[in-house]
Image (tube, helix red, strand yellow):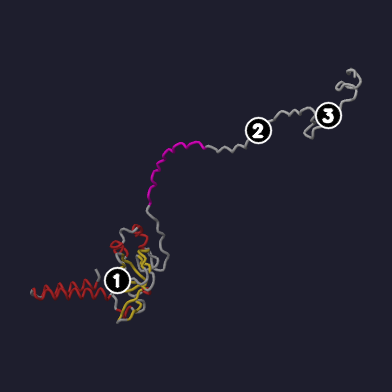
Amino acid sequence: MDYFVATVLFDLKKALSLMKFSRLYAAPVVALSALMLASVALAQEAVTVKDVNVRAGPDRGYPLVVWVPGGSTVYVNGCQSDYRWCDVMAGGDRGWVYARNLQYTYQGQPMTIYGNGPTLALPIISFILGSYWNDNYRNRPWYRNQNQWNNFRPGNRPPVFRPPFQPPRPQIVRPQPPRPPVVQPQPPRPPRPPMQIQQPPRQMPPGNVGQGRPQPMPKPSEGGRGNPQPGRGGAAG
């Protein structure tokens, strides 16, 4: 709980214990305390001027807690004495932001916290790594390396983060089912040539030679047997 909020609650509890109020005055006192708490919370709100990294300590070497975009509203818990780093709440995460990246509204005007800390009168807080990390970072992976970070000083090289050792898990080798044989595709067969039917040679009729015109038959000779000779074997006249 913030220092201002705790102070207001303590003062109210002390005043109620010392003074005897009737029920008639109890409700206004409760309402007034709620307004005071709201005003205190509103008075310590700042806006990020750009995208910022929230760190686990007041230096860029500390581990990254969360990334906050520019224009986001964060709640300032307090700053270091030189007002270079401020402890903020960003949503559900807590960490440190460089004060040049935070603007604070003072008398209606936005002012950068860095260089204007005494004017803004923000609370001064210190950083103790052990208690701070125990309260906020128990579920972080680098929380187990807290001993290495105890010797870290701002401006020095941060320690190398090494994740905790985890024994390798045994690998279960399952037998692979036999693969089916690979069937190579057969090349396509060449097309068969068309079958040629051989026909017997045509016999030409007599008197025809080849496929040309028909040749004339030779004339019979005069002494042949085909025609009778005049004057022989004929009847008497």
Task: Decide if residue 46 is on the left or right side of residue 18.
Answer: right
Instruction: Single out the residue that lies furthest toward the right.
Output: 231
Which residue occupies the foreground of this view, 6 or 66? 66
Write down the region rendered in magenta.
Answer: 165-182
Q: Position of residue 85 (x, y in %)?
A: 35, 72
Instruction: Give how far apart the Cα atoms at labels 1 and 3 are.
Output: 137 Å
| Disc ID at residue 195 | 2
Disc 2 marks a residue whose amino acid type is: Met
> Against 170, is 43 above or below?
below
The residue wearing badge 1 is 75
Badge 2 element:
loop
Disc 1 marks a residue whose amino acid type is: Tyr
The residue wearing badge 3 is 217
> Against 196, is 171 above or below?
below
Instruction: Give how far apart the Cα atoms at labels 3 and 2 are.
Output: 42 Å
Badge 1 element:
strand
Magenta-colored segment: predominant secondary structure: loop
Q: Is residue 14 magenta?
A: no
- Tell me if residue 20 can be seen: no
